[in-house]
């Protein structure tokens, strides 16, 4: 008997090992969405994975993460967020597009990536049938924001966080020194020189100076501020032209009124320094305004003004516009695409709007027009005026000297929908 067991032991062990490897292979090669389990599926006895969203670590993602449980309780299909850094998000979208089937229902992307992602076949166009399943039409969005998601005549994404870069400044410090809000690069340098006081750890200007994408973005924005034409129609930027030399000289002079560690400073670091009261001016995206206006640890709440970035004399006032959008992976199976659209329809439902506006965040929401007012706002149950009154603690202080385009058209005083309103093609002055 022992001899028989001894003879079959090795073959039996080999069979078990092969069987185990086969099970692992089957698991790894099944559809990504077949894995996972959520509590809601217990009622039906079916295993249904949550909707998966790949997103960058920006305010819209953190707001979505904070409200996840409440949104699900409110009827939104269960979902998970894969939050990654900027470069990692771009790399993951591209690598995921090479898989047999996508691991995500939606992916967020910077609109500057869109031409490359479309060229690589990473995203699927959003068509007429998709709008019907979403329960929306293109007119629900600012046409400007929506156009940023087009390549040719095809739409590849929906806006979730359009925003602009402004010059933020300490109103209290400028007022005490009787210094005007700077409107030109030279005026900014002069004001920064006059107001900084290194002995008190107070410096003039914080900006994206870290080598790489941060500095590259600064250079691109400054080229526009000094009058260089920007956009896809002008081709690659040239650094051997007169305007580029002017930008280089300005950046060199800016170092003298910047914090000592400015060359390692980028993105949120500059806003954090401003929020701690250590700089007078900062170039900042409007998506980061809650860091100074709503954060209870901010040292500058209620002391901040916002204006156009300084422009060289003779250059038309303009704003750098950026946008995060959300799109459908091209290798998403048809049944999962339907789930993606159902999730987006649910998350944009009117019943969820109050959840978005409660923390002062209004991305992912549609534009709506109040009858008789004639300008797009975010849909809300109450009238716009009463909503502004109810949200007074979120009102941005815009000085009387601010450019009329900024005060009246691009940046209404009622701040809650700053992501969308600042990119709206129509607007009107608001008095909360």
Image (cartoon, helix red, strand yellow):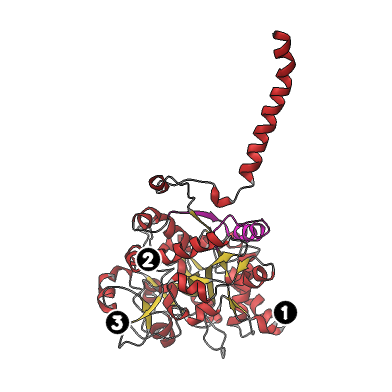
Q: Which mark is residue 144?
A: none
The C terminus lies in quadrant? bottom left
Q: Is residue 98 left or right of residue 361?
A: right
**Camera sees residue 367:** yes
Q: Which residue is mark 3?
A: 431
- Tally the marks: 3
Local crowd at mark 1 within 10 Å, few (<14), some, or many (≥20)? few
The N terminus lies in quadrant? top right
- How far apart in space, not on screen, are marks 3 and 1 (Cα)? 44 Å
Disc on the earlier residue, 3 or 1: 1
| Comparing labels 3 and 2, the label whose residue is closer to the camera | 3
Q: Which mark is residue 293?
A: 2
- How far apart in space, not on screen, are marks 2 and 1 (Cα)? 38 Å
Which is more toward the observer, 333 or 178? Answer: 333
Disc on the earlier residue, 3 or 2: 2
Which is more toward the observer, 121 or 186? Answer: 121
Q: Pinpoint residue 181: horizontal percent, then vertical percent.
A: 44, 80
Which is more toward the observer, 385 or 214? Answer: 385
Q: Is residue 279 left or right of residue 4?
A: left
Q: Which residue is mark 1?
A: 238
């Amino acid at each position: 008997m022992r001899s028989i067991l001894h003879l079959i032991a090795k073959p039996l062990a080999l069979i078990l090992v092969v069987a185990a490897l086969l099970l692992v292979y089957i698991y790894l090669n099944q559809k990504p969405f077949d894995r996972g389990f959520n509590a809601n599926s217990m009622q039906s006895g079916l295993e249904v994975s949550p909707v998966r969203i790949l997103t960058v670590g920006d305010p819209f993602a953190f707001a979505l993460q904070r409200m996840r449980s409440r949104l699900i309780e409110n009827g939104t299909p269960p979902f998970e967020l894969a939050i990654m850094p900027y470069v990692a998000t771009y790399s993951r979208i591209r690598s995921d597009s090479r898989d047999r089937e996508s691991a995500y229902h939606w992916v967020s992307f910077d609109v500057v990536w869109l031409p490359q992602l479309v060229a690589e076949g990473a995203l699927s166009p959003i068509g007429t049938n998709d709008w019907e399943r979403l329960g929306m039409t293109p007119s629900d969005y600012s046409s400007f924001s929506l156009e940023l998601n087009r390549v040719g005549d095809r739409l590849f994404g929906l806006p979730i966080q359009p925003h602009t870069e402004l010059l933020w400044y300490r109103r209290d410090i400028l007022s005490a020194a009787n210094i005007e809000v700077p409107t030109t690069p030279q005026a900014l340098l002069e004001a920064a020189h006059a107001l900084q006081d290194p002995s008190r750890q107070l410096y003039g200007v914080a900006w994206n100076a870290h080598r790489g994408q941060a500095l590259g973005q600064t250079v691109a924005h400054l080229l526009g501020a000094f009058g260089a034409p920007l956009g896809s129609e002008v081709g690659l930027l040239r650094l051997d032209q007169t305007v580029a030399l002017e930008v280089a000289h300005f950046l060199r002079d800016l170092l003298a009124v910047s914090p000592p560690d400015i060359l390692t400073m980028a993105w949120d670091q500059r806003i954090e320094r401003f929020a701690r009261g250590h700089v007078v001016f900062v170039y900042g995206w409007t998506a980061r305004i809650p860091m100074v206006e709503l954060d209870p640890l901010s040292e500058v709440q209620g002391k901040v003004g916002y204006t156009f970035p300084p422009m060289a004399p003779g250059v038309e006032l303009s704003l750098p516009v950026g946008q995060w959008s959300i799109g459908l992976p091209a290798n998403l199976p048809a049944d999962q695409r339907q789930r993606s659209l159902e999730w987006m329809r649910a998350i944009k439902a009117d019943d969820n709007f109050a959840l978005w506006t409660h923390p002062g965040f209004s991305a992912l929401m549609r534009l709506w027009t109040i009858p008789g007012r004639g300008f797009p706002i975010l849909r809300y149950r109450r009238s716009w005026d009463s909503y502004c009154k109810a949200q007074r603690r979120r009102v941005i202080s815009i000085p009387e000297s601010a450019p009329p385009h900024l005060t009246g058209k691009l940046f209404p005083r009622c701040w809650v929908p700053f992501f969308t309103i600042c990119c709206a093609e129509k607007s009107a002055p608001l008095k909360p």
